[in-house]
Image (spheres, coloured by chain):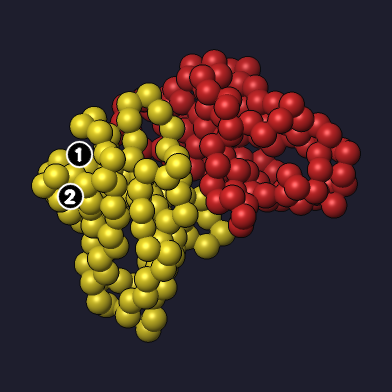
Chain colours: A red, B yellow
């Protein structure tokens, strides 16, 4: 299995531009998670989906952020318009079940720099 | 409001055992104790998890206190590749992993 796939791995954009991050979860996994990591705030959960339906988006910082999961094998995290404070590493993760014992598998992350 | 408390940093020498402590005094009966680690420039990866009994796998051992208010991740022989941030996380069913600050482990040769 290829694991969780994220693209792009690096993104540099200018303030005000739209940014779209992509994630392909592990096949057969019903849960997909988006996290953001910064030096100041550490790893933060942004949103997670179960069977393509958003379950908890309380971590989404503001209306500029939106996430979708149109099918079981693809999810996007969009920032519009982007701001310098959005610069961070964004991780996608997936897991097979919701049990408290289940492992989450993380992708390699997308490093976003907003100038 | 972190549910676990870990030391900010620890140091070890290569080939020596490492004991990484975690306090979780408010743990509920159905919370599992998970450990993840994050190597430099990588995403977090699963290390081990347990509920009540001690657990062993190829990466590490997890020792859980009888009252479950603390646990210890044990790396039996640290290598340079074990240098990472180690996160102790309580997880209930139907929830996502919530990360705290973790413990930064440094390993010297």
Residue at 67%, 34% in the rendered image: A61
Q: Secondary structure at mark 2?
A: strand
Q: Is residue A70 left or right of residue B93?
A: right
Residue A51 lies, in percent from the top left, at 49, 17
Q: Can see residue A22?
A: yes
Chain letter behind tag 2: B
Q: Secondary structure at mark 1?
A: loop
* Same chain check for tags 1 and 2: yes
Q: Residues within 10 Å of mark 2 (few under 14, many from 20)?
A: many
The dot on residue B64 is 2
Query: Do the CB atoms of the residues marked 1 and 2 lie less than 8 Å apart?
Result: yes
Residue at 37%, 75% in the rendered image: B11
Residue A99 lies, in percent from the top left, at 31, 27
Q: Is residue B55 left or right of residue A71?
A: left
> Which residue is disc 1 drawn over?
B51
Residue B100 lies, with reference to residue B52, above or below; the image says below
Residue B33 lies, in percent from the top left, at 28, 43
Q: Is residue B61 left or right of residue A114?
A: left
């Amino acid at each position: 299995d290829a694991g969780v796939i994220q693209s792009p791995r690096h993104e540099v954009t200018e303030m005000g531009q739209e940014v779209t991050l992509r994630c392909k979860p592990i096949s057969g996994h019903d849960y997909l998670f988006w996290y953001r990591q910064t030096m100041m705030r550490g790893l933060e959960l942004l949103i997670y989906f179960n069977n393509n339906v958003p379950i908890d988006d309380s971590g989404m910082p503001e209306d500029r952020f939106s996430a979708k999961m149109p099918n079981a094998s693809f999810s996007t995290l969009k920032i519009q318009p982007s701001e310098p404070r959005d610069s961070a590493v964004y991780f996608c993760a997936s897991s097979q079940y919701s049990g408290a014992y289940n492992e989450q598998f993380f992708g390699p992350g997308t490093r976003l720099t907003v100038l | 409001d972190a549910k676990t408390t870990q030391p900010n940093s620890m140091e070890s020498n290569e080939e020596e055992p490492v004991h990484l402590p975690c306090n979780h005094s408010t743990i509920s009966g159905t919370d599992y104790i998970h450990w993840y680690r994050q190597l430099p420039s990588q995403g977090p990866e699963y290390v081990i998890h347990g509920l009540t009994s001690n657990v062993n796998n190829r990466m590490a051992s997890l020792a859980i206190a009888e009252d479950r208010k603390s646990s210890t991740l044990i790396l039996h022989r640290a290598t340079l590749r074990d240098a990472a941030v180690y996160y102790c996380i309580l997880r209930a069913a139907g929830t996502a992993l919530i990360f705290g600050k973790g413990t930064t482990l440094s390993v010297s040769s």
